[in-house]
Each structure stands twice: as structure tokens, then as C-alpha cells.
Image: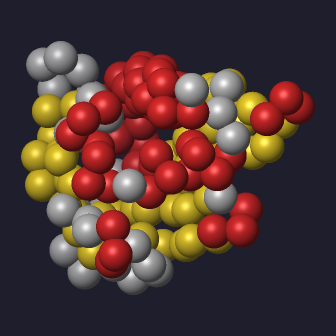
Amino acid sequence: METIIDASPARVWECITDFASYPRWNRFTPRITLANDSFAVGAEFDLDCRMTKSLFLRNEHEVILAVDKERFRFCMGTSRTRGRPGIRSWRWQECVPIDGGKTRFINSEQFKGPLAPLVRLLFGTRLRRAFVAYGDDLKRYAERAEA
């Protein structure tokens, strides 16, 4: 999913990597145990995901898989030590600079493993909607902070 945000990529990056602030603005991930100063490849953490108003996934075990601070992008995914068997995920978040000091925020997730087709079938539509809502929340938060 892509969201155009009227804020600089650096500002959007600050928002998505300030994990302590998630409960204030992020309906999709209202709880995350990753400390800001622990943000590095290999850091394992837990989070809750609000897929819909009635579907709330608790204690998802995740890991930081890649960080590229210069290009304002990172990847998180299923914990390689505590994750669910049969499924692996890679969720990229990227802040791409565009004209006028704005940002194209790209948020995408990929699933692999024997359970991937089932996860896409059961959660694909809900996940896309949740990502749109996440982008909207991020847009409001980053633009308000940029002003």
C-alpha cells in the first residue's frame, strides 16, 4: 500500500521508528515491545495487531530483518526463533522522497511457507484494509508533527 504524506521522509521515518509513540497514533500496532534504542537487525520483540475492529492478534513474535537508515526503510518479520511454524513474513516500510518535500510511504508484506496461501486467503483483504488505515494514521500524525 502507498500513502502520500505531506512531510519529509526524515519526519515520516522518525514516526515509524519511534516505537514508544505507537500507542498514541497507530491503531494497527497499538502495542509493541521494541524499545527505540534496540532498533537494529536481529532485535526480537512482540506486538499486537488490530486487523479489524473485531480481529485483534496478540503477542505476535517479530524480528527486525533489515534496516537502511540512509534510504529510510526497514523490514520486520516473523521471529525466526519464536514465530509461528509454517509461515514466514517480511513487512517492508519505506519512505521515498517525492517533489515538494513530500513522502511516498510504502508498506508491504510478503508471506512464505506452507501456510502462506491460507494466511493470504483468510487475512489478505483485512490486511490490505488495515494497511490503508495504518497509512492514514501515519499521514495524520506525521503531517501534524511537521506543521
Q: Residue at x 26, y 66 (%)?
A: 34
Q: Report the front residue among 90 and 23.
A: 23
Q: Look at the image and tell me whether residue 28 can be seen.
A: no
User: What is the total number of numbered labels drawn onto the structure image?
Assistant: 0
Instruction: Work out whether residue 39 or residue 114 is closer to the camera in this orientation and state it.
Output: 39
Residue 83 in the image: state x and y as whole percent: 24, 67
Farthest residue to the right: give it: 99
Image coordinates of residue 91 in percent, x first then y, are 49, 53
Work out which residue is located at the far front of the displayed protein and give it.
147
- Placement of the N terminus among the 4 image quadrants: top right
x 11%, y 46%: residue: 58
Q: Residue at x 26, y 68 (%)?
A: 35
Quadrant in the picture for residue 76: bottom left
For residue 14, say whether it is visible. Answer: yes
Q: Residue at x 52, y 62 (%)?
A: 75
Q: Quadrant of residue 119?
A: top left
Q: Quadrant of the C terminus?
A: top right
93 left or right of 43? Answer: right
Residue 116 in percent (x, y) is at 41, 49
Q: Position of residue 31 (x, y in %)?
A: 18, 47
- Of residues 83 and 92, the one nearer the viewer is 92
Work out whether 49 lies above or below 81: above
Q: Is residue 82 above or below residue 28?
A: below
Colour setting: secondary structure
